[in-house]
Image (cartoon, helix red, strand yellow):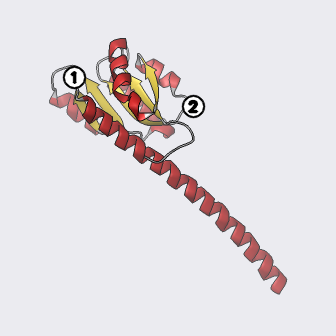
Amino acid sequence: MVKTEKPVNVLLVDDKPANLLALEAVLESLGLNLVKAQSGKEALEKIQNEDIAVILLDVRMPDMDGFETANYLRQRERDHNTPIIFLTAAQENKKEIDRAYAMGAIDYMLKPFDPSVLRTKVSVLSGLYCENMEMKRIIEKLNRKIAELETQNLILTAKMQ
């Protein structure tokens, strides 16, 4: 994984504190900033000014379920393409699985999940996020350099005339 100045954010959303604790235990070794929320509404509030690398989202929650939460997240420019892994304790449901993937989910995992599989998926996705951020920094630096060179070129051209 590309090193960043500060740990990248991973959003964990589940209405059950025990499930959030389990997710935290599984992911803590990755050195990520785990942003925890117990509802869709709380998740939306917590990430107002944060970039999120990966979202782990419980499907069945009271008030605002995982699909509704994902829909709101997808409407935000900042989170439009953020990878979402849906998690559910419900029995496998083809209709829900299809709905999750139609919303752009990266995965749909049943609880109890294999901790090493989830850890690997989050590690890969957060690594891709870091690489993407590094590429954006490089592009910005190159664009600044191009602008400098264009300015110098204009100055030299004016002097030559």
Q: Are marks 1 and 2 in contact (CB under 8 Å)?
A: no
Image vertical order of residue 82 relative to residue 95, above or below: below
Q: Is residue 114 left or right of residue 71?
A: left
Single out the residue that lies furthest toward the front: 29
Q: Which disc number belongs to residue 63?
A: none
Q: Is residue 142 left or right of residue 2?
A: right
| Residue beneath the point at 29% across and 33% down | 118
| Residue beneath the point at 37% across and 29% down | 27
Q: Is residue 122 left or right of residue 115?
A: right
Tell me the residue that label 2 is attached to.
49
Q: Secondary structure at mark 2?
A: loop
Q: Is residue 118 left or right of residue 45?
A: left
Report the amino acid beneath label 1. Answer: Pro
Is residue 108 visible in the rendered structure shown here? yes
| Residue beneath the point at 26% across and 38% down | 101
Is disc 1 surrounded by few (<14), some (14 to 19) or many (20+) residues within 10 Å? few
Tell me the residue that label 1 is attached to.
112
Q: Nearer the viewer, mark 1 or mark 2?
A: 1
Report the amino acid beneath label 2. Answer: Asn
Q: Quadrant of the C terminus?
A: bottom right
